Image (cartoon, rainbow, N blue to C red):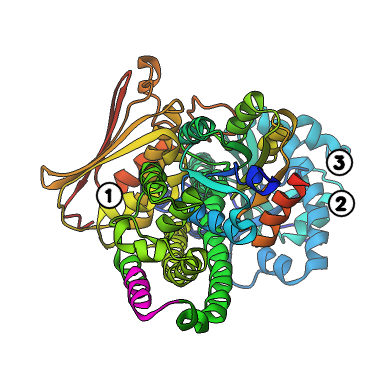
């Protein structure tokens, strides 16, 4: 092992070599500048440097946090074993290297005459030893003349080195690693220019490392921002959905009433019809027995008139009528005038009572009117059933329109008034309490839009209007053509929006409603939806007149 | 005057803003109780007061009111409370399409609510409520 060979004297540095070194330095620096991939920089740096220094091995070594470390890049001359390949191929051997590296590194940290028998913690406590404290390099021309202990010599023999030159690489203030050149064939005296070149390159590697670190941080930040953005979009979707569900929850009660009312009418009418039909079938055969032919003709005329009469009187109109008829019947000395008048009105006979005197003064008047009542109620109850079914399906349809919210909904042609009507239908119950709805609908064309999302806008505006008019008022809806677009206005006669909050109403989570009544997202979402249609939403408010104006362009090709 | 005549001078009043409901209620009551009562309907609480007024002028006593809960103007429970304050003997029944428990509770306490009918109700429920109240 100790076959000593005299060290190679530092070769005189001809100008050519110096120029070559400057050129190589420039090349490497250029590569460092151009490449973003740190491994490429390491590889080309080790190759170029070994070539210019004409050494047997050139490597870049990185410290770990515990001051162990590993070879990251290596250029090695033909015939010499590669530390990189060995380490990567043999895990066990690799661990051995780490141990020996430590032995090696302890010394580096102390310089050529350093105490390599220090505890393992030495580098940790000194945080990189002399390099960290300013030592710029270690040049060893012959490892066997330095009095290195066996441990270290073994490590160096592992590197097959007889001479070496080490310079530290810093990342910011921290000793990151080492750039090492090794002479294996023989000992070597390192020239000042070689040392200077190594130091220069190490400095540039440090810059490259810093850049790589920045790029890495940037990539991590970008990635984290992308994730945040995704999460925010998801959260936004959920909030929109929640807002919708909250509004829906408030509506469910009203909608239940809206559906149960026609259901009640249907159930009652069907039951009443059962009774009417059974009674009518039972009594009809007696018709000829009780009535003569003239009376029969009059009876069917009454039925006929009742069935063809369409006037739907309100209860307040019926009452004076009933009184009139009742008084008339009393004039004819007809008993039970009030009940007969009531029955006649229910049958649908309201005029020319006198023409039915023959029947009304008949001894079987109760029987006659009851049969007429049963026969005619069949028809009116059926009408009730039909209109109630229609009413219930209208509510269900509106609800379906309302509840549908598809984020992937595609634009389609739709009439904005349909959306407004859907919302009015949904809020029918709340509106009918004490709010008068006035519609000023101009004949406007259909527009390409997201109809379901626009329904959400109308819902928010109308709902806010209703809430602003708890004591009653007028809700005015207007649609009109304006500036190549459709203007929709929702005006309420409520107390108005205070000046100090007017600018905030489109902000997310801004609400003047008590907790639980509003999320403060309604108008914010509305604005987002209008923006998506390239439209505008504005508000003007004074007590008794709060006007939300939405303008949507007619042609909307985005 | 026999008892039948006295009875026919009492009225049952139905209050709902939907005409189809009023028609249905009236027909059900009429089919069940016939000439035993006079049946009146009103489309709002205000109209109901008018009807009561008119009937009083005719010396007809309203013995029962079946009122919807959700109506324009005043809610059924408030209306029945007002009715109860003026006519403590009057039987109050609430008809509702949605269970607003608070309103029902309030009506029970302050309007001596006899029963609450839920839409869609059955003829049997309605007539039983009236029958049980009169017995």
Q: Pick the residue in front: B42 or A130.
A: B42
Q: Nearer the viewer, mark 3 or mark 1?
A: 1
Query: Between disc 2 and disc 3, whose residue precedes?
Result: 3
Please state the chain letter of the residue tagged with numbered disc 2 in the rendered image.
A
> Would you name the residue on which mark 3 appears?
A120
Circle 1 crowding by C-alpha within 10 Å: few under 14, some 14–19, many from 20: many
Q: Pick the residue in front: A404 or B56.
A: B56
In whole angstroms, how far apart are the C-alphas of marks 1 and 2?
A: 77 Å
> Would you name the residue on which mark 1 appears?
A533
Q: Residue at x 54, y 48 (%)?
A: B39
When the figure is inspected, residue A555 is found, relative to residue A267, above or below; the finding is: above
Q: Secondary structure at mark 2?
A: helix
Position of residue B12 in the picture relative to residue A434 (left or right): right
Q: Main secondary structure of the magenta part?
A: helix
Position of residue A177 in the picture relative to residue A197 (left or right): right
Return the residue found at the far left: A483
Q: Are marks 1 and 2 on the same chain?
A: yes
When the figure is inspected, residue A497 is found, relative to residue A243, above or below; the finding is: above
Q: Pick the residue in front: B64 or B121.
A: B64
Which span is picked out in magenta?
A: A291-302
* Residue A128, visible in the rendered structure: no
Q: Are marks 2 and 3 on the same chain?
A: yes
Label disc, if present, on residue B115 of the rendered structure: none
* CB under 8 Å between discs 2 and 3: no
> Would you name the residue on which mark 2 appears?
A151
Q: Pick the residue in front: A404 or A39.
A: A404
Q: Are marks 3 and 1 on the same chain?
A: yes
When the figure is inspected, residue A101 is found, relative to residue A250, above or below; the finding is: below
Instruction: Point out residue A216 in the picture as x, y percentages from the top left corner.
Output: 53, 47
Q: Secondary structure at mark 1?
A: loop
């Amino acid at each position: 092992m100790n076959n000593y060979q005299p060290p190679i004297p530092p070769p005189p540095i001809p100008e050519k070599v110096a120029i070559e070194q400057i050129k190589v330095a420039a090349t490497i620096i250029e590569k460092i500048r151009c490449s973003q991939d740190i491994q490429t920089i390491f590889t080309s740096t080790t190759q170029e440097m070994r070539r210019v220094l004409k050494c047997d091995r050139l490597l870049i070594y990185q410290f770990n946090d515990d001051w162990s470390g590993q070879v990251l890049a290596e250029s090695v001359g033909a015939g010499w074993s590669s530390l990189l390949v060995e380490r990567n191929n043999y895990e066990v051997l690799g661990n051995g290297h780490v141990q020996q590296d430590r032995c090696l590194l302890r010394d580096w940290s102390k310089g050529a005459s350093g105490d390599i028998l220090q505890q393992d913690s030495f580098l940790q406590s000194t945080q990189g030893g002399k390099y960290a404290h300013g030592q710029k390099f270690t040049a060893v021309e012959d490892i066997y003349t330095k009095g290195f202990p066996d441990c270290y010599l073994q490590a160096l023999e592992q590197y097959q080195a007889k001479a070496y030159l080490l310079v530290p690489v810093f990342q910011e203030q921290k000793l990151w690693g080492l750039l090492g050149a090794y002479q294996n064939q023989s000992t070597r005296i390192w020239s000042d220019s070689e040392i200077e070149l190594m130091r220069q390159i190490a400095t540039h590697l440090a810059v490259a490392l810093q850049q790589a670190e920045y790029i890495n941080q940037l990539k991590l930040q970008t990635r984290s921002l992308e994730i945040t953005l995704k999460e925010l979009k998801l959260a936004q979707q959920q909030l929109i959905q929640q807002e919708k569900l909250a509004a829906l929850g408030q509506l469910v009660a009203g909608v239940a009433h809206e559906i149960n009312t026609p259901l009640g009418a249907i159930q009652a009418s069907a039951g009443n019809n059962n009774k009417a039909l059974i009674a009518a079938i039972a009594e009809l055969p007696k018709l000829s027995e009780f009535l003569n032919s003239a009376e029969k003709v009059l009876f069917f005329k009454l039925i006929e008139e009742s069935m063809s009469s369409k006037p739907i009187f309100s209860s307040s109109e019926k009452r004076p009528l009933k009184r009139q008829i009742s008084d008339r019947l009393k004039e004819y000395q007809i008993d039970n005038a009030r009940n007969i008048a009531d029955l006649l009105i229910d049958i649908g006979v309201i005029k020319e009572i006198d023409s039915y005197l023959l029947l009304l003064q008949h001894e079987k008047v109760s029987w006659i009117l009851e049969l007429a009542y049963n026969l005619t109620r069949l028809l009116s109850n059926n009408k009730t059933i039909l209109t109630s079914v229609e009413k219930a399906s209208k509510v269900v349809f509106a609800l379906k329109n309302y509840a549908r919210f598809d984020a992937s909904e595609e634009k389609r042609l739709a009439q904005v008034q349909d959306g407004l009507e859907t919302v009015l239908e949904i809020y029918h119950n709340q509106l009918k309490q004490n709010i008068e709805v006035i519609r000023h609908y101009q004949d406007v064309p259909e527009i390409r839009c997201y109809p379901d999302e626009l329904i959400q806008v109308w819902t928010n505006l109308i709902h806010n209007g209703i809430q602003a008019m708890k004591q009653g008022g007028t809700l005015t809806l207007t649609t009109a053509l304006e500036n190549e677009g459709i203007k929709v206005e929702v005006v309420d006669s409520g107390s108005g929006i205070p000046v100090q909050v007017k600018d905030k109403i489109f902000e997310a989570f801004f609400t003047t409603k008590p907790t639980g009544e509003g999320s403060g997202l309604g108008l914010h979402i509305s604005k987002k939806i209008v923006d998506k249609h390239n439209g505008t939403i504005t508000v003007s408010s004074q007590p008794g007149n709060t006007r939300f104006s939405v303008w949507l362009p007619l042609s909307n090709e985005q | 005057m026999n008892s039948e005549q006295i009875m026919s001078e009492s009225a049952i009043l139905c209050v709902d803003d939907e005409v189809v409901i009023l028609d249905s209620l009236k027909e059900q009551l009429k089919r069940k109780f016939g000439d035993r009562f006079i049946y009146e309907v009103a489309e709002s609480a205000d109209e109901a007061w008018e009807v009561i007024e008119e009937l009083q002028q005719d010396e007809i006593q309203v013995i029962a009111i079946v009122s919807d809960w959700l109506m324009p103007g005043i809610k059924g429970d408030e209306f029945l409370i007002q009715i109860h304050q003026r006519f403590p003997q009057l039987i109050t029944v609430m008809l509702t399409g949605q269970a607003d428990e608070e309103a029902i509770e309030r009506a029970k306490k302050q309007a001596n609510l006899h029963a609450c009918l839920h839409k869609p109700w059955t003829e049997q429920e309605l007539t039983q409520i009236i029958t049980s109240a009169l017995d």
